[in-house]
Image (tube, rainbow, N blue to C red):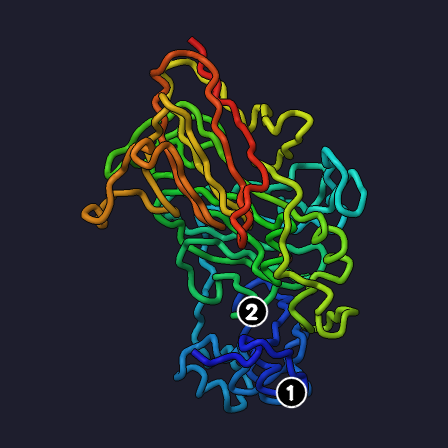
């Protein structure tokens, strides 16, 4: 792996061609990865790398070249009149079992907030994903992508504004379909179809991977759930379904999706005023007004808003979230499946009160004790950890709760602790209501 000078804390040197190439990111105007093969810089729709003219051969460091094998690269580096007639097809885009479209919500995504932001406003700009990119249907967190284990999936990214990616976090696609913008390419106005195989059943998520630290904070993410390959799957969010416990399938009566997030309103006001690329210097044709990004301060994250699944906690309501999408009500004896994602930059501790003792059955999209990894892990009761689970950014735990306990209201608490100082910033309570 090459050492990237900027990683050693110096600013991007635009006079250094190889350095610029390492950071160059390509907008893609064509709908398949076939379009990436442009060895002679002749295709319209790409942003040309710096210091290269239309029709001129690219540098060997060009990511459109370096994504491919050495053998492939050697062929490509010689000028080829008709590359598609000679070159292999890494991504033939066969007929998928399931397709999704996700478009980024353009700047109009404004959410009301329960108290004033750092800029003194009672609303906050939040980006996100849904099918249309319009804000007249839910967009934050992004609409769930839900698949059945093992099937071939196409997810089409159709951006409405700027360039973005979809990274399907925790699955193992080809590098070209991994959606990591700075390692492969960004998707411009024409869209791109990511192709991947639905991973082992479990809880995953997808997010934009352009200027990731900012775009993720702005809300460009959603859950990605892979259900077991059984009749009726994929199941509906929040309803009943089936889940693996080790190698067996278990029914659950209700699914609870807790996507825990925090927001620093400075980022949603001052930072985005400096552009989609604020903090990463020059990308493509986007420039930011701040010459060397010293005004952006993405290393400073001091959240002032705290959410679960898009619902803001408010001190006026004692930070108790009773919204039915977050706070479940079940009949005693029913089984709840909790899927918990930490989409915050704070470290969160989720605490279940005694006598609730949910069983942890999966972590980060992998069922504990499922073949072929049965010898490495087993499900365990959360009470063995004092009823607490501590998640850092992007971690997911799945828990099964048997509610055969006395009827009543049980308060689950979520503590948000600063990512550097560990200071407790907020404690949010979510009631779990069990009726007789
Ligand atoms: Cu983005």
Q: Residue at x 48, y 23 (%)?
A: 411
Q: Which residue is mark 1?
A: 55
Q: Position of residue 118 (x, y in %)?
A: 76, 46
Q: Position of residue 248 (x, y in %)?
A: 24, 34
In what element is the residue under mark 1? loop
Q: Which mark is nearer the camera, 1 or 2?
A: 2
92 or 381: nearer the eye?
A: 381
Q: Which residue is mark 2?
A: 182
Q: Residue at x 43, y 75 (%)?
A: 88
In what element is the residue under mark 2? loop
Q: Are marks 1 and 2 in contact (CB under 8 Å)?
A: no
Q: Residue at x 32, y 31 (%)?
A: 383
Question: Which quadrant is home to the N terminus?
Answer: bottom left
220 or 179: nearer the eye?
A: 220
The crowding category of the residue bearing disc 2, from other C-alpha atoms within 10 Å (few below 14, some 14 to 19, many at least 20), is: some
Does the rendering let one see residue 237? no
């Amino acid at each position: 792996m090459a050492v990237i000078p900027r990683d050693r804390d110096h600013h991007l040197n635009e006079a250094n061609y190889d350095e610029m190439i390492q950071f160059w990111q390509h907008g893609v105007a064509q709908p398949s990865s076939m379009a990436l093969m442009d060895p002679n810089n002749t295709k319209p729709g790409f942003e040309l790398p710096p210091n290269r003219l239309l029709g001129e051969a690219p540098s060997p460091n060009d990511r459109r070249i370096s994504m491919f094998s050495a053998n492939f690269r050697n062929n490509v580096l010689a000028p080829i009149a008709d590359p598609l007639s000679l070159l292999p097809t890494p991504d033939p885009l066969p007929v998928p079992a399931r397709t999704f479209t996700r478009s980024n919500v353009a700047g109009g995504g404004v959410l009301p907030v329960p108290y004033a932001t750092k800029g003194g406003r009672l609303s906050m700009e939040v980006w996100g994903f849904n099918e249309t990119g319009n804000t007249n249907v839910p967009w934050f967190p992004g609409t769930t992508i839900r698949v059945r284990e093992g099937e071939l999936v196409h997810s089409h990214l159709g951006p409405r504004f700027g360039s973005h990616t979809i990274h399907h976090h925790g699955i193992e696609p080809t590098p070209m379909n991994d959606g990591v913008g700075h390692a492969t390419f960004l998707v411009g106005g024409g869209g791109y179809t990511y192709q991947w195989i639905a991973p082992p059943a479990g809880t995953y998520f997808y997010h934009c991977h352009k200027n990731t630290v900012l775009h993720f904070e702005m809300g460009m993410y959603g859950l990605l759930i892979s259900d077991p390959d059984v009749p009726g799957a994929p199941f509906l969010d929040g309803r009943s379904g089936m889940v693996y416990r080790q190698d067996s399938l278990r029914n659950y009566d209700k699914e609870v999706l807790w996507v825990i997030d925090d927001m620093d309103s400075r980022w949603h006001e001052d930072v985005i005023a400096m552009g989609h690329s604020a903090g990463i210097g020059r990308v493509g044709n986007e420039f930011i007004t701040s010459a060397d990004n010293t005004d952006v301060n993405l290393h400073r994250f001091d959240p002032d808003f705290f959410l679960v699944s898009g619902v803001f906690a408010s001190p006026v309501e004692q930070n108790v979230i009773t919204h039915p999408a977050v706070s479940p009500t079940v009949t005693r004896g029913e089984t709840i499946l909790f899927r918990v994602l930490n989409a915050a930059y704070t470290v969160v501790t989720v605490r279940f009160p005694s006598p609730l003792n949910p069983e942890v059955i999966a972590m980060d999209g992998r069922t504990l004790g499922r073949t072929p990894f049965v010898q490495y892990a087993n499900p365990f009761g959360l009470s063995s950890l004092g009823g607490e689970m501590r998640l850092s950014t992007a971690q997911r735990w799945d828990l099964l709760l048997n509610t055969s306990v006395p009827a009543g209201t049980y308060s689950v608490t979520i503590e948000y602790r600063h990512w550097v100082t560990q200071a407790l910033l907020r404690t949010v309570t979510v009631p779990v209501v069990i009726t007789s």
